[in-house]
Image (tube, grey):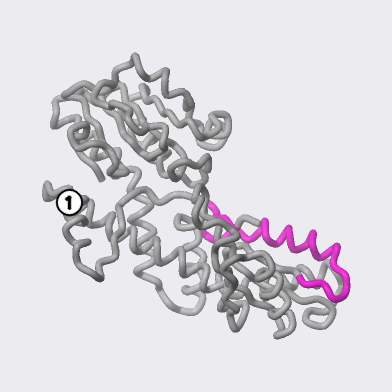
Amino acid sequence: MPTPVDCNNHPDLEPLIGASRTVGGLLAKGDIVVYESTVYPGVTEDVCVPQLAAASGLAYNADFFVGYSPERVNPADTEHTVESIVKVTSGSTPEAASFVDSLYNSVLLNGTHRAPSIRVAEASKIVENCQRDVNIAFVNELAKIFAAMGIDTGDVLDAAATKWNFVRMKPGLVGGHCIGVDPYYMIEKAQVYGVLPRVMYSARRLNDSMGAYVAGQVVRLMNLNGVRVKDARILILGFAFKENCPDIRNTKVADIFHSLADYTANITVCDPWVDPERVRREYGIDIQNSISELQHLRYDAAILAVAHRQFEGLDLRRLVPRPGVVYDVKGVLPRQQTDARL
């Protein structure tokens, strides 16, 4: 089940609680319930188990048992598929843990890692996402600094990556359900224990600001190039939260759109992967799927927000004649086509 946050970024466990009640009504003696949802440590045993027990009338670790094996699905990743990854497993008793571990081992090519407790398994998943969030926030901060200095961030990272122990990361928009949401679960739980997670909280704030930052950079470049921003024709390529994927959950491209909408209503969003009706329903934004319809149009600015393979080879300089602005969020366009990249 999904584990979202509410409008104030507090964990919303209602979908998980509702699913637990449903499953609890079907439990029989000896059953093992295995959870995969990303949660902070303690949710499985402290929140879900009481729902199972209440709905079933059965006793925990006597009549029924639980396991936890965090999902590791990466949308659009054809290399790290469910069969090929290592799965973390755990159980509420040694016997349950062994059963859960054997179950996953029966279908996974690369096996499992058996954690010593459910809480450890829960923590391992959320740490994976928090680490990525912090790392991306670091390079996003560098991108802001180097943009102010007039230095290309990609060039800096290329040079730094020649050192043997440099960890190469790229700046970008952090959307989706994992990196953009799950750290809030750890932030919330840490504060319950009296720990203020300053690094994670700052990373979240910085990454959440990048959509508005990109829009601001485009407006700045348009002004520098003498391009009138008010009522300008602007093209945004991509709306999904990552390339070659139809997932629009928590996409930060929406932030780019809404920031630019303060200046102009003439914004075209093109994404061949996503469902326009769903985007309209969830974000109030009209988009188009067809790239061919763009070929005969001209724009004052274009933003490559998502590097879908359908955009490869697209000549943005033909769509945006100079002094129009081309901004490359993903850093994949030929340099001669762009005015700046993140």
Vertical comparison of 186 with 205: above or below: below
Residue 2 appears in which quarter of the rendering?
bottom right
Q: Position of residue 128 (x, y in %)?
A: 46, 67
Instruction: Write the start and end of the magenta stretch as one range.
Output: 3-32
Residue appearing at x 67%, y 56% in the figure:
15
Within 10 Å of the Cα at label 1, are there few (<14), some (14-19), or many (20+) other Cα atoms? few
Residue appearing at x 35%, y 44% in the figure:
211
Q: Position of residue 46 (x, y in %)?
A: 67, 75
In-front residue for pair 225/108: 108
Q: Position of residue 257 (x, y in %)?
A: 38, 34
Identify the element where label 1 is drawn. Answer: helix
Left or right, 208 with respect to 63, comes to: left
Q: Total label count?
A: 1
Vertical comparison of 265 with 69: above or below: above
Left or right, 321 with respect to 66, comes to: left
Name the chief secondary structure element in magenta.
Answer: loop
Residue 217 appears in which quarter of the rendering?
top left
Residue appearing at x 68%, y 78% in the figure:
91
292 magenta-colored: no
In-front residue for pair 23/188: 23
Disc 1 residue type (three-letter): Asp
Left or right, 327 with respect to 99, comes to: left
Residue 34 appears in which quarter of the rendering?
bottom right
Q: Position of residue 1 (x, y in %)?
A: 66, 57
Residue appearing at x 67%, y 69% in the figure:
104
Q: Mark 1 sits on what residue?
A: 155
Left or right, 218 with respect to 286, comes to: left
In-front residue for pair 228/76: 76
Vertical comparison of 110 with 291: above or below: below
